Amino acid sequence: MYKVTTNKIEPDDLFDWLQKPHNGAVVTFAGTVRSDTDGRKTLKLEYEAYTEMAEAKMKQVGEEIRTRWGIEDSAMIHRVGALNIGEISILIGVSTPHRKNAFEACSYAIDRVKQIVPIWKKEIWADGGREWVEPKS
Amino acid sequence: MRIIVKCFAGCKDAVGAASIILEIPTGSTVGEAFIKLIENYPALEYYKKSIMLAVNRQYADRQVQLKENDELACIPPVSGGNQVC
């Protein structure tokens, strides 16, 4: 399951989807909206996606995990739209027979998603500023 | 020929639209199309070096040749890197 959604992300749904009888470990990572960055207060974040490509690229990350660790069961959901502090923007889960691979693959997945999945976030600062977040060069 | 250009995030702000039709000479490359875009929307100059371009939802080098009705996407840098979520 690799999808972009405007709906609130429900961790239980992803967990239930990932949990399979042959697996003994489910590792999940949730990215949540932080209240401040470098001392500046955030009011909310707005996420925008190139949805069709973003879903294809998340699927590609899933395939990379399958190739590298032999993991069949992975899922990634990214929310778009306006999110409040503490809400989940991304949820990634990996399910495996043994835990070590699941931790490694989940860590790899979030790094890869941040590299290749075309989704952007705009900071809506509490002081009224608004700006797209870009890598610090 | 005509191609469809999709713009996101800061590129969308620079162009002032999420999607536009661009008229370019037949056989133009991705890089040539982007230069044409900068001519039409000078604010895109800011993204000249950092932008990634995709053709029909696949990242594409600037040498790739475009075809009629291709979907060219302007993908500004994603936040990525060390500051996760």
Image: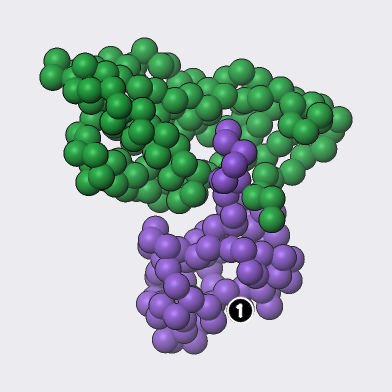
Chain colours: A green, B purple
- Could you tell me which residue is drawn at 21 percent across and 16 percent down? A24
Q: Residue A45: x percent and y percent?
A: 66, 31
Q: Chain of mark 1?
A: B
Residue most extreme to the left: A22
Disc 1 on helix, strand or loop?
Answer: helix
Q: Left of A86 or right of it: where is A15? A: left
To which residue does mark 1 refer? Answer: B36
Residue B58 appears left or right of A73: right
In the rendered image, the vertical position of residue B15 relative to residue B3, given as above or below: above
Figure check: B64 above or below B53: below
Q: Disc 1 marks which amino acid?
A: Lys
Q: How many marks?
A: 1
Q: Is residue B7 visible?
A: no
Q: Residue furthest right?
A: A127
Q: Based on the displayed image, in which of its 4 quarters is residue A72 positioned?
A: top left
Quadrant of image for the N terminus of chain B: bottom left
Q: Is residue B19 above or below residue B27?
A: above
